[in-house]
Image (tube, grey):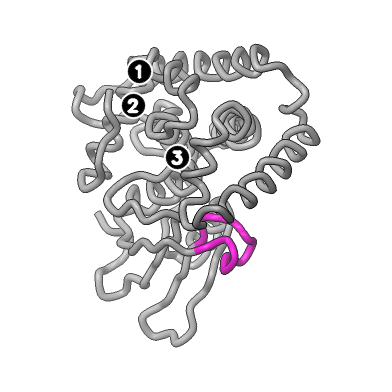
Amino acid sequence: MDHQDATEQPDITLFRGWKDTGRHVWSPYVIKLEARLRFAGVRYATAIGSPKTAPKGKIPYLEFRRPASASPLLLSDSSLIVKSLVALDALPDLNGGLGPAERSHDMALRALLEDKLYFYHTWERWVQNYYAMRDHALWSIPYPVRVLVGVLVYRNTVATLHGQGTGRFTAEEIASFRLEIWKSLDALLKASRSSSKDDNSTSFWALGGDQPTEADTCLFAFIVSVLICTASPGSQKVVKGFPVLLDYASRIHDRYFPDYEKWTA
């Protein structure tokens, strides 16, 4: 059901960084925003965009325009975009009905994904699988300039990961950290699916409720990002080894993204 009447819906354009029409893109933050919009039945258009024109210099960002408004709002950062759209009454508050404990659990799950697992994935993609990541992330930059820009991005990423802490661990240690997180998420979703009263064709949610929360947008996004990214073969193998993770993402995709190409098993 649409959050707003069709005549009142704003014009929304999501800048995803890649062409890939009808497909999920590698960025979990783009997938997260698309899931957030689709959970609410909000229509939107997609465009490529560029970090150069993004308000905070990063993908994704979003243009929001009311039907009667002449000037659009340009919003950046996936979490801040969601908060802004909720404040503008363009999205419902998914966590509005949660109690204090559930809110804390939801926030902790998002932090685990966005503030911890994200950096392990970044290391895997840019350090272990540099060429695949470079050519995908910098697809719009022609050779030989892409080679030079790729080196600069690599150096900056390595420095960031070292300062953040991930870059100080060995490959084996990072792999074990990733596996530990995915095991915990698998256990969480097993419990949620077991407590779900719905049949096998409908979605079940991370916190075990009848409706999605903000955590589900993140969890779905990180699973799908791994499944479609050719620069994260280690994580992809791990995720494909947990049938419940695949079932969770598959049900959400089939229900909310029927027009998008699905990953291969």
Q: Which residue is mark 3?
A: 213
Helix, strand or loop at label 1? It is helix
Q: Which of the two marks, 3 or 2, is nearer to us in this view?
A: 2
Could you say which disc has been placed on residue 244 in the image? 1
Rendered image: mark on residue 248 = 2
Q: Which residues are magenta?
A: 50-61
Which amino acid lies under the numbered mark 3 shown in the image of this protein? Thr
Q: Main secondary structure of the magenta part?
A: loop
User: Mark 2 belongs to which amino acid?
Assistant: Tyr
Residue 198, percent across and down?
23, 25
- Label 1 vs label 3: CA separation? 18 Å
In the foreground, 122 or 97: 122
Question: CB atoms at circles 2 and 1 under 8 Å apart?
Answer: yes
Point 33% across, 26% down: residue: 248
- Three-letter amino acid code of the residue under disc 1: Val
Q: Looking at the picture, tell me which residue is in the foreground, 243 or 206.
A: 243
Instruction: Quote the CA–CA distance across marks 2 and 1.
Output: 6 Å
* Closest to the observer, 256 or 106: 256
